Image: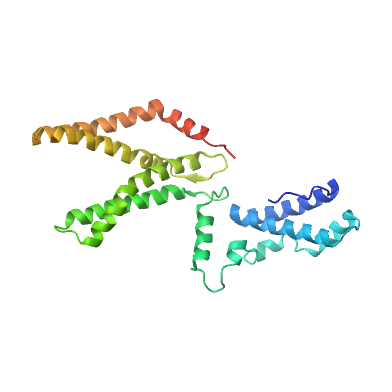
């Protein structure tokens, strides 16, 4: 919310805050997202300050009472909140909800932390999509004797970037889920995304070393041992270091 005007008397600022708090309670009751609430309250507060400035040197206490009586009552936002759009949404051309600006606004609203609504963490969802796309392209390439050039191009673009993106998005999802004001869930999925590709690369490197022996039986046995060892190590690591890892993630950023 924007900063209050510094020269306002305490009783005037208190009336403004009471009005804004009443509006926010209505918006919370209507399950309005955090981003939309903040923009609506900013617009209302800016409007109040502009109307105060228009009154000039008049008595501020009397002026604020008159101004608040001219504004829509807080309950009006329950029925008319769709008209109180955010600046980016209001500037989008009418009748074009899928314009670039409208899509960008929808994306920002979906991506932002929304404490008033429980949902699967958006970074975890995007990470799962990136990982699924990579697996789909790999399956298509392996199922084709001679992959088409467009498929090879997509694979060359997604292959190197998807593992990094999935790992980063998983780590970001862990941080968001652990934040105090967050109501997001999906911690197991976020942890899998964080550690899947680093563990996979380590396993592939070990299997590559074993494959140099040219003993197929030894490679198969080693692969089975690696899989069993991974499961056992993952269970042990979670019991031994899981909470310590989560506490370290929490310590990387402030819990706003």
Q: Is residue 29 visible?
A: no
Q: Position of residue 178 (x, y in %)?
A: 50, 38
Q: Is residue 232 visible?
A: yes
Colour option used: rainbow
* Of 237 and 5, the residue lying toward us: 5
Q: Position of residue 41 (x, y in %)?
A: 69, 55
User: Residue 15, image x and y in percent?
Assistant: 81, 51
16 relative to 162 in the view: left or right: right
Q: In the rendered view, tell whether residue 164 sits above or below residue 158.
A: above
Residue farthest top in this picture: 240
Q: Residue at x 25, y 30 (%)?
A: 229
For the point 46% across and 43% down, the residue is: 172
Would residue 209 appear left or right of 52 to someone viewing this image? left
> Within the image, what quadrant is residue 230 found in?
top left
Q: Residue, x 42% and y 45% (percent of image)?
A: 169
Question: Where the C terminus falls, by quadrant?
Answer: top right
Residue 150: horizontal and vertical position, in percent? Answer: 25, 62
Callout count? 0
- Residue 3 appears left or right of 217: right
Q: Is residue 22 left or right of residue 54?
A: left
């Amino acid at each position: 919310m924007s900063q209050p005007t510094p020269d306002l008397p305490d009783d005037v600022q208190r009336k403004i805050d009471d009005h804004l708090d009443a509006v926010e309670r209505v918006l919370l009751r209507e399950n309005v997202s955090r981003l939309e609430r903040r923009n609506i309250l900013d617009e209302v507060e800016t409007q109040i300050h502009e109307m105060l400035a228009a009154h000039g040197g008049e008595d501020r206490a009397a002026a604020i009472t008159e101004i608040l009586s001219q504004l829509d009552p807080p309950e009006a936002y329950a029925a008319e909140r769709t008209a109180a759009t955010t600046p980016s949404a209001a500037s989008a051309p009418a009748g074009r909800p899928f314009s670039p600006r409208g899509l960008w606004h929808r994306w920002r609203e979906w991506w932002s932390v929304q404490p008033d609504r429980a949902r699967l963490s958006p970074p975890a969802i995007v990470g799962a999509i990136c990982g699924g796309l990579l697996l789909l392209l790999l399956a298509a390439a392996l199922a084709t004797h001679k992959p088409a050039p467009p498929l090879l191009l997509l694979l060359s673009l997604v292959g190197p970037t998807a593992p990094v993106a999935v790992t980063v998005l998983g780590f970001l999802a862990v941080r968001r889920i652990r934040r105090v004001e967050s109501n997001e869930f999906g911690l197991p999925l976020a942890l899998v995304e964080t550690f899947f590709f680093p563990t996979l690369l380590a396993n592939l490197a070990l299997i590559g070393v074993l494959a140099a022996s040219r003993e197929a039986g030894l490679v198969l046995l080693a692969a089975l041992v690696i899989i069993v060892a991974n499961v056992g190590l993952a269970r042990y690591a979670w019991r031994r270091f899981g909470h310590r890892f989560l506490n370290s993630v929490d310590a990387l950023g402030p819990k706003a």
